[in-house]
Image (tube, rainbow, N blue to C red):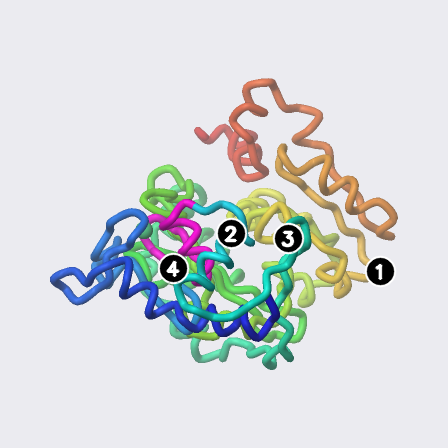
Amino acid sequence: MTGDELQAVRERLPEYVEAVTTKSRGGFYTCPLCGSGTGPNKSGAFRVQGDRWRCFSCGKSGDVLDLIGEVERIPDFRDRARRAVELFGIDGSMKPAGAAPEVRRESKPEPVFISPETMQASFTAYERNNFAWWLCGVFGESKALELALAYRLGTSKHWPGAAVFWQIDDAGRVRRGKVMLYDSETGRRVKEPGNMVAGVHWLLGMADRKPPACLFGLHLAAADRSKPVAICESEKSALIGSGFVPEFIWTATGGKGCLNRAMLEPLQGRRVVLFPDLNAFDDWTEKAKGWPGVEVSDVLESRASAEDRAAGLDVADYLLREQGLNV
Ligand SMILES: [Zn+2]
């Protein structure tokens, strides 16, 4: 299947959605995968935007081929493509089995930074922000507020109680925003009914115009060059680290797999210490080999019990435990 054919198939998404699901009484599509109609915030679980779909209840998303695969239980990409051709009557010669699917070749649209106004509009309603509530429980109100302001923590209406973590680069540009829902009691991510993570570009209908990611907290590292920089995995760990171990400027990659060398470029010439979560130690150690000035902390790795490993202890858990706080 050529790139053009693939694109033609992708554009048939609305048609396929119409074919496999119905609208609920409220006028929203019912998710053909999990059956949710209204979604967690009663504004529709299943959304179609351009050639992409996403369900905010079960957290699944993708293009029309992914949906065909899910609905018709077709795991293999080539089989999905064949089925799409059958459904939509698009003539495409299939690649022989084993060949990699052809990737859509199009000039990439220009990346769009998020406007400062959009970010600023999120600096509100911390009383409706579960993560901010939990942070107050850990640090007390004034310290929690100080941390929230430093990291530019936002509140999102996307899910009731959701927070926005903005990636602000060393030039002060807002590269990305990540909306996540936390539990205000436990400080843990809410993962039911769906994954409850959404990118701001996606929400703004600009999913394909994201600038490259930068470290969460990079703006703080740029503002204070006197301190070494700690890099951990989650945004939450960065805030917790900043509160308890202020000897470092704490930043986060936003995910285990997100660490890359380009992210570290703005930190050239500085002491950088990676604080991987337990499950990322080997991966990050391997990646950081030969990155000048970058150390990998084994503080978690060297102290973890078998129980900790089974529980997948992360940097925030460890720091909270060090403070005698229940995790
Ligand atoms: Zn669903």
| Residue labelled with disc 4 | 54
Name the quadrant of the N terminus. Answer: bottom right
- Going by the numbered disc 1, the residue's amino acid type is Gly
| Residue labelled with disc 3 | 258
Q: CA distance from mark 2 to mark 3?
A: 30 Å
Q: Is residue 263 above or below residue 59?
A: below
Residue occupying image coordinates x 55% and y 68%: 92
96 is within the stretch colored magenta: no
Q: Residues within 10 Å of mark 2 (few under 14, many from 20)?
A: some
Q: CA distance from mark 4 to mark 2?
A: 22 Å
Figure quadrant of residue 168: bottom right
- Going by the numbered disc 4, the residue's amino acid type is Arg
| Residue labelled with disc 2 | 79
Q: Residues within 10 Å of mark 4 (few under 14, many from 20)?
A: some
Residue 75 x %, y %: 49, 45
Is the C-beta separation of discs 1 and 3 under 8 Å? no
**Mark 2 against mark 1, which lies toward the viewer?**
2
Q: Mark 4 vs mark 1: which is more N-terminal?
A: 4
Q: CA distance from mark 1 to mark 3?
A: 22 Å
Q: Start and end of the magenta stretch?
A: 54-73
**Mark 2 against mark 3, which lies toward the viewer?**
2
